[in-house]
Amino acid sequence: MRHWLLAFTAGFLAVFCFHQPALALLHAAGVVPFPAFSLDPVAPLSVPAVVSSAFWGGVWGVVLVLALARMGKQLIWLKAALFGGIALTLVALLLVFPLKGYGLDWQLFVPRFAIGFILNALWGLGALVFLRAFAPRA
């Protein structure tokens, strides 16, 4: 149980410490139109968007731990970045966006994928940073 709680916490914190600061930089550079750390309520519970993102980051933290356990420890940093960059971004673009009514705009798929890849790869690296901090090598 403690193992899963640490994985959830690592993913949760990675949103606040890696994903959202990167989003803030992209917003400041004019790459994305929306700011980081949004407190706008999201359905269905009307929690702040950043809290919702952090919750899902925690859920994905558990999935990341399961995936990394199957992939082995070699190049683990690269695997964490690629997992976040590819898996989370594809799920967002192909499942979450359509469920939220954004649809699949194939003309915007590549730029959205690139932005999502950057943000989510940093999340993956951040989650691994926290996982390593929580469970140092014996």
Image: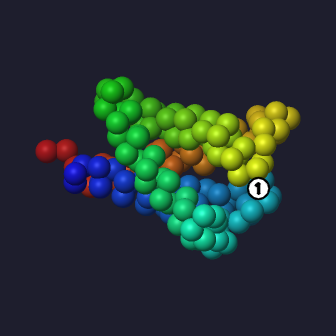
**Colouring method of the image:** rainbow
110 versus 58 height, above or below: above
**Quadrant where the C terminus is found in the figure:** top left
Q: Is residue 91 left or right of residue 73?
A: right
13 versus 41 height, above or below: above
Q: Residue at x 75, y 62 (%)?
A: 34
Any part of residue 44 in sight = yes
Any part of residue 133 in sight = no
**Residue 130 lies in what quarter of the image?**
bottom left
Residues 93 and 122: in front is: 93
Q: Give the mark count.
A: 1
Picture coordinates of residue 80 (x, y %)? 44, 38
Picture coordinates of residue 21 (x, y %)? 58, 61
Amino acid of disc 1: Val
List the residue tagged with mark 1. 32
Q: Is residue 138 left or right of residue 87?
A: left
Q: Residue at x 71, y 56 (%)?
A: 26
Q: Residue at x 48, y 53 (%)?
A: 57
